[in-house]
Amino acid sequence: MGGIQFVLVREGSSDDGLVPLIRTLIVRAGADSAIGAARNYKGTMKERLERVLAEEVKPELIVVHRDSDSKSANARYDEINSAASELGCGDEVVAVVPIQETEAWLLTDDSAIRSVVGRPKGRAALNLPALKHIESTANPKELLQEAFLIASEATGARRKKMAKQFQKHRATLLERLDPDGPVVELSSWQRFVTDLSDSTVAALEKNS
């Protein structure tokens, strides 16, 4: 059916792990291939999108990542969709808005957390919120930090060293996020997958 070129406009380099996930989901939606990379453009949402649209090769899809930083993603969707509409690129823009923070998606799989810190057979209780409560739980980043430390079962100097590796462990966990794993229970993930699939199909039909 053809390939898709995409750009991820993300909040920071720690979210680059979204790129392979997006690639996988685009192919699942029907594309023969998906090629894309992250952009770290700054400024207002409109300015960031303008930077993408000014690139020498315009992508078929522009995926914009913004954490909701609250229990509702509506304000972020409005922000992204309003800027895209103003620039006339609404059909090409897909919003990815984890409710609360991206770390909420990473709290869904305790076995993955244990593996990342090198204790795949660990038994320590990680005190993670139930799946149905994750998106209503504040401060998922702090919960993930604590879960890494508990899962490592480290003490003393090793625990302090482990605490300094949070960004590395977080990035690895995002890269390993299973698109068919427990994260499918979260509404923000479901919306992202549906929106990306619909936009991919539309892009393929447009290019056919």
Image (tube, rainbow, N blue to C red):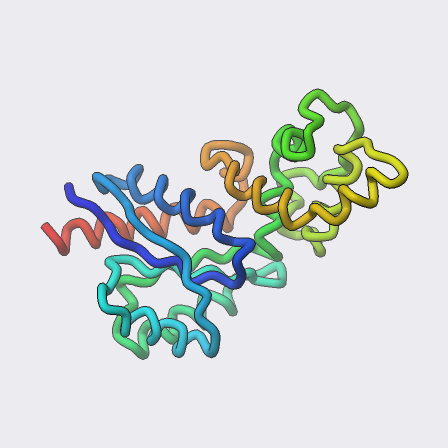
Describe residue 61's horizontal placement relative to residue 125 as left or right.
left
| 181 w.r.t. 146: above or below | above
Q: Position of residue 56 (x, y in %)?
A: 23, 68
Would you identify the image quadrant in which residue 124 lies?
A: top right
For the point 71% across and 55% down, which residue is it?
139
| 41 w.r.t. 164: above or below | below
For the point 68% across and 51% down, which residue is it?
140
Of all residues shown, which one is farthest toward the right?
156
Nearer to me, 199 or 130: 199
Describe residue 22's horizontal placement relative to residue 27 as left or right.
right
For the point 27% across and 69% down, which residue is it?
55
Describe residue 57's horizontal placement relative to residue 126 as left or right.
left
Q: Position of residue 153 (x, y in %)?
A: 81, 31
Describe residue 202's horizontal placement relative to residue 122 as left or right.
left
For the point 78% across and 40% down, which residue is it?
149
* Placement of the N terminus among the 4 image quadrants: top left
